[in-house]
Image (tube, rainbow, N blue to C red):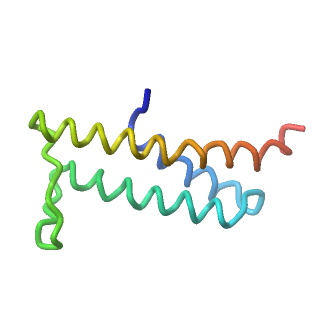
Amino acid sequence: MFGCLHTNMDIYRWAYKFYPFVSSELIWDAFQLTRDIRMIDMLASPYDMSSYGYEPVRVETVEGQQKYMRYQQEFYERGKPLRKRLIDELKFLAD
């Protein structure tokens, strides 16, 4: 099962912390995922971003909760290959 959006944001955090042992391509890919997650995180919070053309994800409604869950699933799926790449690139440290 997928989970909290922030666990997928941690991919970027750990990739960045382990630079230069992690490729800049992976760091960039993880950053892009984190940027997209942060946008949804903000839209599902009390921040008013309507002046920027963004509609809130109204998690207080059933429809909003379902939309948020779809985002969680999407970000989890996008994060899986990045998580694997991060592990693969750091395996040499365990040897």
Q: Is residue 79 left or right of residue 38?
A: right
Q: Position of residue 28 (x, y in %)?
A: 58, 65
Q: Residue at x 32, y 45 (%)?
A: 71
Q: Residue furthest top?
A: 1
Q: Residue at x 73, y 57 (%)?
A: 22
Q: Is residue 85 left or right of residue 54?
A: right
Q: Residue at x 29, y 37 (%)?
A: 69
Q: How many marks can you see?
A: 0
Q: Is residue 43 left or right of residue 38?
A: left
Task: Find residue 29 and report its image quarter.
Answer: bottom right
Residue toward you, 6 or 65? 65
Q: Position of residue 87 (x, y in %)?
A: 71, 42
Q: Residue furthest bottom?
A: 52
Q: Position of residue 30 (x, y in %)?
A: 55, 57
Task: Find residue 84 and report its image quarter.
Answer: top right
Q: Residue furthest right?
A: 95
Q: Quadrant of the N terminus?
A: top left
Q: Position of residue 37 (x, y in %)?
A: 38, 53
Q: Quadrant of the C terminus?
A: top right
Residue toward you, 7 or 72? 72
Q: Residue at x 56, y 42 (%)?
A: 80
Residue toward you, 18 or 44? 44
